[in-house]
Amino acid sequence: MAMQVLFKIIRQSENSAPRVQSYQLEVEPGNTILDCLNQIKWEQDGSLAFRKNCRNTICGSCGMRINGRSALACKENIGSEVSRLQLSTGESRNRDVKTPEIIISPLGNMPVIKDLVVDMKSFWNHLEAVDPYVSTGARKIPEREFLQSPAERSQLDRTGNCIMCGACYSECNAREINPDFVGPHALAKAYRMVADTRDAETATRLEKYNQGTQGVWGCTRCYYCNTVCPMDVAPMDRISQIKQEILPLKDAADSRSIRHRKVLVELVKEGGWIDERKFGLHVVSNYLRDLRGLLSLGPLGLRMLGRGKFPLKFEPSEGVAEVRSLIEAVKEGARSEE
């Protein structure tokens, strides 16, 4: 059944302020957002700019924000979008009450070229930074193919689904505050190389992905990338898998990022929850070996004492044994999956 929908599109030219332009359409619930944008461009405003290609969730070209979340315009349809809006706002499902409004805006974390078209240069540069291709040395096997078993190939299935649409990059909080962070799309591809048995540069890759906050330790674990990924790649999970490959190779004293993760687990195993006094000393001062780090804790400690927020004692959880067994069970499960 046809319905009236009001589209509010954020329009913008390069280096200019954005503006909202509204278009009212009569559409079917099964029409995709891309169908509607095409209708606007063909029937109402030929100057509207957006990317498209396959129209079938394959190429990733039509990435944009639909009512505040990054998605593919060719995948989302009017019926599901209106239902989502009604569910989130609690509005009546009676379409006569109010014309549904759908807000379309460009992807985030990338500068706008025109309307819904963004400059993806940083997106591709960050992908290139992780060397997302199998090392040539590993493929130099004369006179025969480099075969993989079905089990080996299955390790690549999920990351192989990535279509480079930019949805995860658009929603990445870490990328928003840290322009050096390569982004979830790049690290998902990075894990594909780590898991690929044909690649001969795994150790070098892990060293590279472990550096500072441009690699895996820059991720804030907000899970937005998992939420918006249209292909179920789950980039956040792939980042965690790279971390699990790095941790056994590193001593806790190697870097603050490594210490942060290891000390957290150690303290939870020891007391059921985190002893905040030890956490700061172990992570920031490197078990009292980093004098500069230790001194940096002084001002914070004094402020906490002055406001009565410094824990003078620590009471272990009653469920320490249970927590410890759960951690060990998770570790054992991870080892068995390998």
Image (cartoon, rainbow, N blue to C red):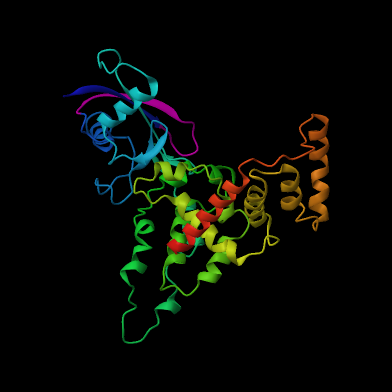
Q: Compared to 336, does 283 lie above or below?
A: above
Point 83% across, 55% down: residue: 291
User: Measured along the vertical axis of the image, is residue 23 above or below residue 276?
Assistant: above
Residue drawn at x 55%, y 65% as measured from the top left? 206
**26 or 95, which lies in front?**
95
Residue pushed farthest left?
A: 1
In which quadrant of the rendered image does the N terminus lie? top left
In front of the other: 64 or 150: 150
Which part of the image, by quadrant, shows the C terminus? bottom left
Total numbered badges shown on the rendered structure = 0
- 256 vs 119, nearest the viewer: 256
Residue 181 location (% of width, % of height): 56, 52
Task: Give the farthest residue toward the bottom.
Answer: 143
In the image, residue 269 sits, relative to residue 35, either above or below, namely: below
Relative side of 61 to 270, left or right:
left
- Residue 93: % across, % down: 28, 18
| Residue 15 in magenta stretch | yes
Location of residue 127 with respect to 77 vertically, above or below: below
